[in-house]
Image: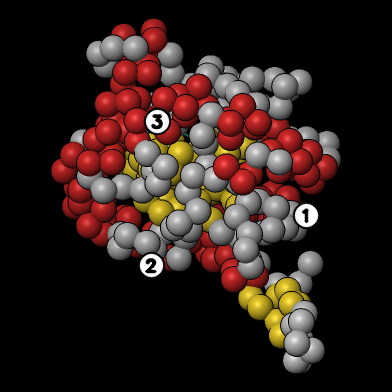
Amino acid sequence: MTSRTLICNPLYLPVISVPDKLRMNDPRIIVALDFPDSMSALNLVARLDPSLCRLKVGKELFTAAGPQLVETMMGKGFEIFLDLKFHDIPTTVANACRTAAALGVWMMNVHALGGRRMLAAAREAVTPGTARLIAVTLLTSMDQSDLDEVGLKGEPQDVVQRLASLTRDCGLDGVVCSALEASRLRKAMGADFCLVTPGIRPADSSPDEQRRISTPRQAIENGSDYLVIGRPITQATEPVEMLSRLNKDIEDIRDVSHFDNF
Ligand code: C5P
């Protein structure tokens, strides 16, 4: 696919071409590029298409390959979720967020557990309406025993709700949450709050270490806007077929989007 799309004009004026960014296209699947080096990531990316997915760069790949790889992938037309889950003193997090926004990423995140002042500083550093700024509430790998052990009060759903409310109060655009929490959060947080959901597994695949998992369809039906999917796609024998299958699974419910007004 080329990086520009031809549009036919019904008045028979000359055919124009429109940059891909202007296409009415909002892929819901974000492929988690959890690779140890840029070559492995780029091998997969070469087979993907920006109209079918966005890409997530997390700690492992970013530590290995840095901003240069992010720029390379943006140059191929992909929108990037920079998943570095910043969690530090407010000034440090604000500066990191400002730097990520200047890189031109589509989405970035911080840990809501960093607290109100850290979240507010992050918001101040990223102009609303530019890069989406979201917060991680609770990692989907954590369950009640993990919460008890680290001393977080309440059940996972209460902790998630508390952290999501704090995130919204601080003006951030949304949260990362499990699909099982999405319907409750959608009701509580309203239509414009962005819900990004990892822990997604096709019905027939392994949960790996994820504890609170769901199928893509369930997640979208529960109110998630975007699905972060890693190993089911990256480790598939045919990653592109798997991505198409997962997109197909949700295409007839895409119209219930809750977050189209960004
Ligand atoms: O391979 P898998 O689909 O489990 O990958 C999930 C991705 O989502 C990983 O990159 C992981 O770091 C990320 N993630 C998560 N749970 C969160 C936030 C992010 O699994 N709460």
Residue at point 26% right, 48% down?
171
Gap in angstroms between the C-alphas marked 2 and 1: 27 Å
C-beta proximity under 8 Å, tags 2 and 1: no
**Residue 257 location in percent, x, y?**
54, 45
Q: Looking at the picture, how far across and down is residue 24, in whole percent?
A: 62, 63
Name the front one of labels 2 and 3: 3
Seen at 32% across and 25% down, the residue is 161
Crowding around mark 1 (Cα neighbors within 10 Å: few <14, some 14 to 19, many 20+) is few
Amino acid type at image mark 2: Ala
Q: Is residue 5 left or right of residue 141?
A: right
- Residue topped by disc 1: 47
- In the rendered image, which quarter is residue 71 located in? bottom right
For badge 1, the amino acid type reads Arg
Q: Quadrant of the N terminus?
A: bottom right
Identify the residue position indicated by label 2 in the image.
102
C-alpha distance separating marks 2 and 3: 33 Å
C-alpha distance separating marks 3 and 1: 37 Å
